[in-house]
Amino acid sequence: MNIFQDWPEPIVRVQSLSESNLGAIPNRYVKPLSQRPNITTHNKHNPHTTTIPIIDLGRLYTDDLTLQAKTLDEISKACREWGFFQVVNHGMSPQLMDQAKATWREFFHLPMELKNMHANSPKTYEGYGSRLGVEKGAILDWSDYYYLHYQPSSLKDYTKWPSLPLHCREILEDYCKEMVKLCEKLMKILSKNLGLQEDRLQNAFGGKEESGGCLRVNYYPKCPQPELTLGISPHSDPGGLTILLPDEQVAGLQVRGSDDAWITVEPAPHAFIVNIGDQIQVTLLFGYFSVLITFLHITSKL
């Protein structure tokens, strides 16, 4: 059986290209000049490396009303000025965060034939993949990924989940459960900042039972010409919230600042990066509600 038969072209794993010791990347991965990365040196004198706002969510659950109000204001300001912020004291244990990253690190270092048992198709994209879209000859990103539906329960399909490494499904289940709790907590905070009832956004986006939740794990292999390509092309996220668990050792996420410059985000230890998606951005600007797609996203640069 051809596991790649639904794709218009042969699928090449970026990790395989990286491990073949290429001197130059194939033309399929070379971005147009306007999309090539802004590679900068990470130091305190570099104006294009920054730490986006870091919010201590624990301050919202104290008896200090002034501190609560200040924290809500910090979140509101971060949403308006950045669309991104980092959260600490968010409720998920550092041990579970580390376990999740270690599990996916192990998966991507499994033999290729084992990973390809979970190869995806463009029908749902669930599973192990290396491209999005079916356009022949399209310029591709320098990354592999794994994509899963977590909720609603009608879309969750455990046969799409990786079976290795050992205990990975239990760890992923625990991680996703805690991530849903964090997303629900953030939705309440955003509702409150909009002057709404705490459950207004959650209910408007389908409620707890029907809100969409997906997990995507990105793997960016070593690249011989990083100045010519990108792990993921510039984009905005179409859903409600994207929660990123980054690799703290490799700062790879860039966000566009108010001056249109791409700024590298320095992850804080055991923090999540919160990205306000397009649909909530519209809500924040115009008070318009739409269908929520919540992305539960681990960004791994292993």
Image (cartoon, grey):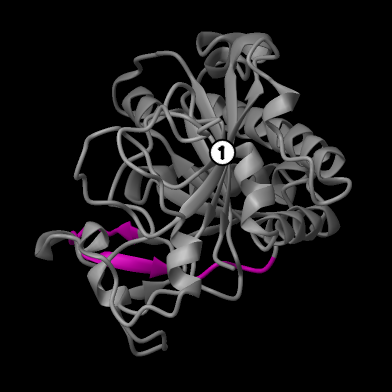
Q: List the residue tagged with mark 1.
A: 119
Q: Which residue: 38% across, 25% down?
A: 279
Q: Image quadrant of residue 299?
A: bottom right
Depth check: give the residue in front, 229 or 8. 8
Q: Which range is magenta?
A: 255-269
Task: From the top left corner, tell me how far across and down residue 269 is, in percent.
Answer: 67, 68
Q: Is residue 206 above or below residue 134?
A: above
Total marks drawn? Answer: 1
Q: Would you say residue 134 is visible in this rendering?
A: yes
Q: Which residue: 44% across, 47% down?
A: 130
Label 1 environment density (alpha carbons within 10 Å; few <14, some 14–19, many ≥20): some
In the rendered view of the protein, which quadrant contains the C terminus?
bottom right
Depth check: give the residue in front, 136 or 153. 136
Query: In the picture provided, is 176 more to the left or to the right than 290?
Result: right
Q: Is residue 36 above or below residue 44?
A: above
Q: Would you say residue 220 is visible in this rendering?
A: no
- Residue type highlighted by circle 1: Ala
Indicate yes or no whether the magenta region holds residue 71.
no
Depth check: give the residue in front, 10 or 126. 10
Indicate yes or no whether the magenta region holds residue 260.
yes
Task: From the top left corner, tell me how far across and down residue 41 is, in percent.
Answer: 35, 87
Q: Residue furthest left?
A: 33
Task: From the top left corner, tell me how far across and down residue 162 is, in percent.
Answer: 72, 40
Q: Which residue: 20% across, 66% down?
A: 36
Query: In the picture provided, is 267 more to the left or to the right than 229?
Result: right
Depth check: give the residue in front, 21 or 236. 21
